[in-house]
Amino acid sequence: MSVLSNERPIGFIDSGVGGLTVVKEAMRQLPNEEILYVGDTARCPYGPRPPKQVIEFTWQMTRFLLKKNIKMLVIACNTATAVALEEIKKSVDIPVIGVIQPGARAALKASNNSRVGVIGTLGTVKSDSYKNELQEKAPDTYVTSLACPKFVPVVESNQFASSVAKKIVSETLKPLKLENLDTLILGCTHYPLLRPIIQNVMGQQITLIDSGAETVNDVSTLLDYFNLNNYEQTNQKARTFYTTGSPKMFKDIAHEWLQIENLNVFHIDLGE
Amino acid sequence: MSVLSNERPIGFIDSGVGGLTVVKEAMRQLPNEEILYVGDTARCPYGPRPPKQVIEFTWQMTRFLLKKNIKMLVIACNTATAVALEEIKKSVDIPVIGVIQPGARAALKASNNSRVGVIGTLGTVKSDSYKNELQEKAPDTYVTSLACPKFVPVVESNQFASSVAKKIVSETLKPLKLENLDTLILGCTHYPLLRPIIQNVMGQQITLIDSGAETVNDVSTLLDYFNLNNYEQTNQKARTFYTTGSPKMFKDIAHEWLQIENLNVFHIDLGE
């Protein structure tokens, strides 16, 4: 593989801004890497959509980035990972990584009482992807899953630190508090923006697993394994964000969350 | 890939007992996996040997395990990783993992002041593998390396908790104490057996990176990536250890370190 090819960007895709929690961690751990991001904000949330449609949308984002010559694709969205990862991984000739296996692996490592909770979108919870992954690897694990359909809209509307957010989180997670869990997987990349509230509601004794942050370990491992690291230092500007929604709204959340000034955010249209 | 192939064992190779520190962590994180281990105790230490010979010995262990139909190979030895990983990885058709990249990655993640120490065998330190890996990824990292040729013999002779060990570690590491390091890579899989002594000598403020334990994350990631996980529960007996030295001595250390009774340890001859 030529040196030049290692300077190609890594692509990240998500239904909206949630995947930025993965990008934030990637920027910290892999500062040399160029990043391209697509957030399908206009059609977010993916959670309640039928799997067939989520697969179609995920392919649209993937094709957009493949044309830009990415060297690796990160499906930084749990809903899309659950239904589209295997198909896309088989069909393209670059490494493709999802967020579910890294999250499940970290939860098994963290849990002492083998009682793990999973919160995610309706799509992710319905797919049982986390439950299957956890129980295939450690059959004795008790897994309880809860769909939190109100969380993503709160984050996408930039209200993730509001009193509305506190109320929604507190009411939604109530049933999980009786489950004696010691580990809770944030099975949606939007949820780390609600992390302080979730930790507060669930109590300090519970370990929260940020599936997105865990995924960056996999990105790093596979960059090493396939000799794809970029050893040239990348200009900070070499991070470009595309959204199907409002660049202004996207920029506001990205700025608040990633704390980078002057983000390159562009509007794109996917599909018709 | 057939389901059957996923039940194939993972192979681990080392110059002696050091790789057991990797196996111990693998057994914890990947309890379903069958493990085959080769320790070349009779020809240990590899550290002072010329690279060409280390490559030859590493190939002998690799060929022994390939005949046993392993699905993945872990070079659980820093000296062998430094000189033989790239060649073996290119030549065989199963995933091959070394211990240096995972250790370097973990050190970069852990260090706050970008001053990292590396201790290893003469071979590992001479190869500059850690230094190159660290500085390619984060050019501003200050790296100081120290060969500790007396450590491996102390471990292989099962004296790793003795007062002799304390004296040797304390004298050897003296020059590192003036370096203002916040992270120290245990760049030899034998060294975690000396970990309590090393931590005591270097002080509690320093983060020790166990390159072997970090490697298990990579094993797990690549099992996921290549769909190679064994989802059948493995009998504890499905762990087999081969040594070119004394099975009795090997068993004693393995028992003390892994705390498993009734280890299957067999003597083998490699080379002539």
Image (spheres, coloured by chain):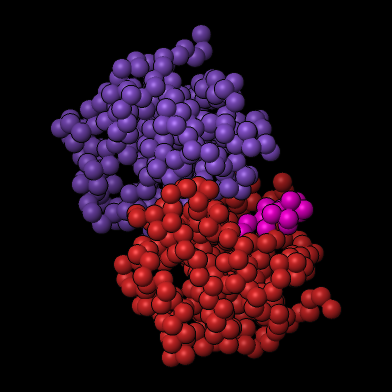
Chain colours: A red, B purple
Residue A244 quadrant: bottom right
Q: Is residue B25 above or below residue B58?
A: below
Q: Residue at x 26, y 51 (%)?
A: B178
Q: Residue at x 36, y 70 (%)?
A: A178
Q: For the magenta stretch, what is the residue range?
A: A85-98
Residue A262: % across, % down: 60, 83
Q: Is residue A198 above or below residue B85?
A: below
Residue occupying the far left of the picture? B163
Residue occupying the far right of the picture? A272
Q: Is residue B229 left or right of residue B131?
A: right
Residue B167: % across, % down: 17, 34
Q: Is residue B265 left or right of residue B8?
A: left
Residue A184: % across, % down: 43, 65
Callout count = 0
Q: Is residue A185 above or below residue B163?
A: below
Res. B223 visible in picture: yes
Residue occupying the far bottom of the picture? A163
Q: In the rendered structure, does residue A93 fall within the stretch colored magenta?
A: yes
Q: Residue at x 66, y 32 (%)?
A: B93
Residue A67 quadrant: bottom right
Q: Is residue A256 above or below residue B136?
A: below
Residue toward you, A101 or B206: A101
Q: Is residue A63 left or right of residue B256?
A: right
Res. A235 visible in picture: no
Q: In the rendered structure, does residue A71 fall within the stretch colored magenta?
A: no
Residue toward you, B268 or A209: A209
Q: Quadrant of the C terminus of chain A?
A: bottom right
Q: Residue at x 54, y 85 (%)?
A: A154
Residue B70: % across, % down: 57, 29
